[in-house]
Amino acid sequence: MGNHEKSSYEAAVLVLLSLSKGAKSRKNILTALLSGPKNCAQIAKELSLDWWTVQKHIQVLYRENMVVHLDFGRIKFYKLTAKSEEIIKRYSS
């Protein structure tokens, strides 16, 4: 990624995690995934959120290439991409 692309991506991520509706929940979900892959039910329980809310935010994060999923039978586990892990660690501090 070039410097311009990198700064554009980080600006978009910053909007997604701080300025847009649901930003706090998405940031909390990403922070929860720092400890490793989890499914929606695990994230919902850990953050005291509704499963559907977590699923909605996960879909947004997936579309923005911030999480990827691992299929284990019918269950999907989500984990951070390397780029989103770097960004969330930087902005969580």
Image (cartoon, grey):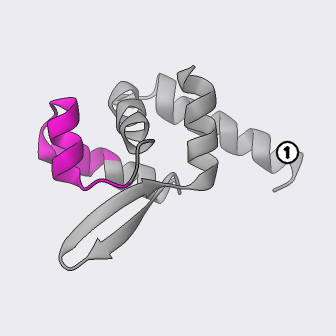
The spot of residue 78 in percent (x, y) is: 36, 58
Which residue shows up at 42% across the image and 32% down it?
Answer: 27
Name which quarter of the figure residue 81 lies in. bottom right
Q: Position of residue 89 (x, y in %)?
A: 58, 32
Amino acid carrying mark 1 in the image: His
Q: Is residue 54 magenta?
A: yes
Q: Residue at x 81, y 56 (%)?
A: 1
Q: Residue at x 15, y 50 (%)?
A: 41
49 over 69 or under it: above or below: above
Relative to 66, say whether 16 is above or below: above
Q: Residue at x 40, y 29 (%)?
A: 23
**Mark count:** 1
Residues 15 and 75: in front is 75
Q: Main secondary structure of the magenta part?
A: helix
Dividing the picture into quadrants, the one containing residue 79 is bottom left
Rendering coords of residue 19 (x, y %): 49, 23
> Which residue is identified by label 1?
4
Chain part drawn in magenta: 37-57
Q: Is residue 92 magenta?
A: no
| Position of 83 relative to 86 (above/below) | below
Left or right: where 33 falls relative to 50: right
Residue 78 appears left or right of 13 = left
- Image quarter (top left, top right, bottom left or bottom right) of the C terminus: top right
Q: Secondary structure at mark 1?
A: helix
